[in-house]
């Protein structure tokens, strides 16, 4: 199961990179990562002795200015391998694409469109979604935002996945008073089994 998730995450990264035009060679690309190495022994009397040596790698890539447009690509994921006994329920090797989306930022009206796995933020909370979102500033201080897609749920092994039957949408209309803040209404809506 973990191997299948890693293969799926690799396929998503390869597909996303294939969408980037050749003019992206002039893009600003930032890659960052963190490695966490741990070691511990568990030795209980009359039970088995275990030695754990997990290595976890977190990797993020942000590519901005793809071509001469407002397109950007954002990826973040992690992978873990056990070099001794299995340290978690997910198996000796596991990983996931936490988020990965293509984003367009319009030069006018502060418009933005996202496509992929991203965090959709509304007044009622934050949802990790495999889908699409759009937002823009309108005249008179109004702003509009919308998102739709499959919510990402966590199974018993804590690996995120898209829910099998769910679909969630949300919208927000707000008015921004320059000195006082923002007043708005939002409406999230979902369909299906929340547990996947």
Image: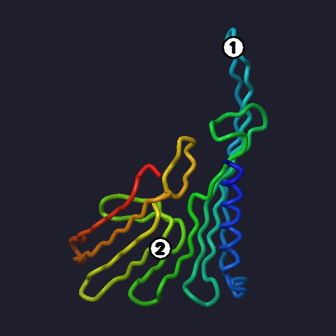
Question: Percent position (x, y) of residue 25?
Answer: 73, 83
Question: Percent position (x, y) of residue 118?
Answer: 50, 65
x 52%, y 58%: residue: 162
Question: Percent position (x, y) of residue 45?
Answer: 68, 9
Quadrant hosting residue 137: bottom left
- The kind of secondary structure element at disc 2 is strand
x 73%, y 43%: residue: 81
- The kind of secondary structure element at disc 1 is loop
Where 149 sits versus 125, above or below?
below
Q: Badge 1: few (under 14), some or many (20 or more) residues near its Cα, within 10 Å?
A: few
**N-terminal of the two: label 2 or label 1?**
1
Farthest residue to the right: give it. Answer: 83
x 72%, y 17%: residue: 48
Where 86 sits versus 95, above or below?
above
Residue 108 lies left or right of residue 160; in this view the side is left
x 55%, y 52%: residue: 160
Location of mark 1 (residue): 47
Residue 137 lies left or right of residue 50; in this view the side is left
Residue 181 lies left or right of residue 102; in this view the side is left
Colouring scheme, one of rainbow, by chain, secondary structure, one colour: rainbow
Location of mark 2 (residue): 132
Residue 119 lies left or right of residue 88; in this view the side is left
Question: Percent position (x, y) of residue 37?
Answer: 71, 41
């Amino acid at each position: 199961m973990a191997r299948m998730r890693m293969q799926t995450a690799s396929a998503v990264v390869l597909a996303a990179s294939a969408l980037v035009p050749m003019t992206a060679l002039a893009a600003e690309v930032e890659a960052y990562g963190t490695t966490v190495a741990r070691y511990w022994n568990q030795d209980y009397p009359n039970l088995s002795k275990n030695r754990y040596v997990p290595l976890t790698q977190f990797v993020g890539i942000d590519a901005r200015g793809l071509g001469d447009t407002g397109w950007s690509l954002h990826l973040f994921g992690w992978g873990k391998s056990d070099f001794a006994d299995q340290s978690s329920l997910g198996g000796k090797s596991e990983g996931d694409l936490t988020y990965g989306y293509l984003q367009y930022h319009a030069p006018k009206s502060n418009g933005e469109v996202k496509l992929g796995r991203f965090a959709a933020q509304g007044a009622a909370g934050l949802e990790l979604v495999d889908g699409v979102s759009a937002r823009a500033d309108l005249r008179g201080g109004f702003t509009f935002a919308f998102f739709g897609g499959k919510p990402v749920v966590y199974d018993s092994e804590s690996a995120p996945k898209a829910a099998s039957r769910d679909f969630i949408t949300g919208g927000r209309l707000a008015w921004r008073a320059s000195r006082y803040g923002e007043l708005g209404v939002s409406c999230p809506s979902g369909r299906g089994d929340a547990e996947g």
